[in-house]
Structure formats: structure tokens, C-alpha cells
Amino acid sequence: MAGAAEVVAWRPPVPGLTEVLHARFPDHAYPPHTHEAWTLLLVDEGAVRYDLDRRPHGASRAAVTLLPPGVPHDGRAETPAGFRKRVLYLEPGTLGPGRVGRAVDAPTIDDRELRDRVSRLHAALRPHPEELEAASRLAFVVERLRRHLDRDVVPPGSVRDDRVADRLRELIDARLPDGVDLSSVAAELGVHPTHLVRAFARRHGLPPHRYLTGRRVDLARRLLLDGMRVAEVATAAGFYDQAHLTRHFRRMLATTPAAYARSG
């Protein structure tokens, strides 16, 4: 893995996340340091050796690594080939100070489902953050991290709560261009965000973010057939720009918005 280091970092508009970092390091070694945030690490290529609180550990593609805030650690490639990683920095209060010691003792989490969830969360954060999807996926990641730290990883039970599911659907329908804030709606309804997402999926057959995207595409179709320009339709229907609309439009209808408009 020769060549120069590659680093891409950004701050996503998702409550609970302070930063996202994607990096490739052929030969970089981190000096000892601390973070204010929780560090959730995926290694995609190579392997990393690090000391956490002066104890040696390793991070590889087989697991998820969670480093607690305020605890010194370093990092270096385990082999001359270097490593590639993806990192999420979680707000300090996300997992609570009471779990810091447990993370120091066991920063490596061997959980394929959790790794898949974290990877899907990264995908939802680029190139344009799908905010409702990212918030939903983050809620499930945090839920599973807490259970690992509390040594209470059990399969989630079935959730049936038609009242909150229908209320969320009403709010999505009423706020298509702006979308909804998952945490705010969950707090308003007095439930946890993961409860809200599970209840919605059971009641309506798909997760809230997919329902929202489908309704936005429906709105875009109507606006296109009314003669609105594609770029204006994108923002009017709640997409970031024309490229964002086109990506979802192709996925739904196998054609572009412009071609769809011309067909009429």
C-alpha cells in the first residue's frame, strides 16, 4: 500500500456525530493522544496496533474498535503495507461516562452485525447525508454498542406500536421537503428512536427513511409533469441538488428526471 496518505474528514448534520474520517495511511504512526469524543473505528485494509491506557491492542477487519473519550492511545500499522480505516466520532454523552472503564478493558468488539451496521451508517453519510437514514442507523449502532458495553447483547424483541408508527408517517407526509428529526419525534412521542423505527417498519413494511425517499420521488414526479425545471424540482421535493434527485429517481424508476419529464 505505497503512496501518499489520503485523509477525508467532514462534520455530518446528524445529532450525536461530531466528525467522520476516512483515511489511508501507508506509514503514518499516531503519537499518544486523547479525544473528547468516542472513537468508533473500522479497519478496511491492513491492521493497526495501538496502546490504550498503556495496554497493547490490535484492530483488524474482523472486528469493530471503540476507544473511549479522555483515555490516551496511539496507533501504527502492524505491517509495512499500512492500513485504511473509517472512523466515526460520537459525542461524549452518547454512551455515558459510566461505560468508559468497560471500553478501556475491552475496546475490541467482535460482532459482524455491528460492523455491518457501522459500515451502512458510513454509506448513509456520503456523498450527501441521508439524514433520516443516518439518524436511524446511528440509533441502532449506539443501542448495540451500549448492550456490548453492558454485556447484554440479546436479539431485539418484536415491536408493535401502531400509534407512534402512524404519527411518524403523518409527520413525514406533512414535511416532505424538510424531513423529520428522528430524535425530536421520538422524544415528542415518549419512545426511544429505535423503538420508533422498528414500530414504523412493522406497521408500514419499510423503514422511515425509505418511505420518505419514496414520497419525495412521488412529489418530484408530479412537479416534473407540471413543467417545473429539474433543478427546481430537486430542492422543492427535498433533495440536495439535481444529482441527488437523479440518483434516487434512477433507483426508483430506471430513468432520469429529465427523460421522465420529456416523456410527457
Image (cartoon, rainbow, N blue to C red):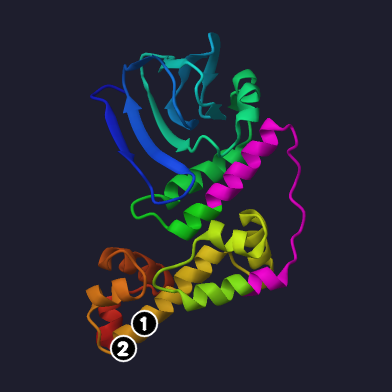
Give the residues in magenta: 137-166
Residue contact between numbered discs 2 and 1, judged by CB atoms under 8 Å: yes
Can residue 125 be seen in this snapshot? yes
Position of residue 95 measured from the top left corner of the image (x, y, whole percent) = 59, 36
Query: Regarding mark 1 in the picture, which secondary structure is present there?
Result: helix
Q: Residue at x 64, y 61 (%)?
A: 196
The reply to whether the magenta stretch includes residue 163 is: yes
Position of residue 72 measured from the top left corner of the image (x, y, whole percent) = 48, 16
Position of residue 74 measured from the top left corner of the image (x, y, whole percent) = 43, 15
Would you identify the image quadrant in which residue 44 lies? Answer: top left
The reply to whether the magenta stretch includes residue 177 is: no
Q: Which mark, by number, is residue 221?
A: 1
In the image, is 233 to the left or to the right of 180? left
- Where's the N terminus, which quadrant? top left
Q: How many marks?
A: 2
**Circle 1: residue type:** Arg
**Circle 2: residue type:** Leu
Residue density around tag 2, few if under 14, some if 14–19, many if 20 or more, within 10 Å: some
Q: Which residue is drawn at 67% across and 31% down?
A: 149
Position of residue 33 measured from the top left corner of the image (x, y, whole percent) = 41, 17
Query: Regarding mark 2 in the picture, which secondary structure is present there?
Result: helix
Give the Cα separation between the discs numbered 2 and 1.
Answer: 6 Å
Q: Mostly what secondary structure, the magenta segment?
A: helix
Q: Residue at x 39, y 51 (%)?
A: 13
Can residue 201 be seen in this snapshot? no
Q: Residue at x 54, y 28 (%)?
A: 65
Residue density around tag 1, few if under 14, some if 14–19, many if 20 or more, within 10 Å: some
Q: Is residue 226 above or below residue 183?
A: below
Residue under label 2: 225
- Where's the C terminus, which quadrant? bottom left
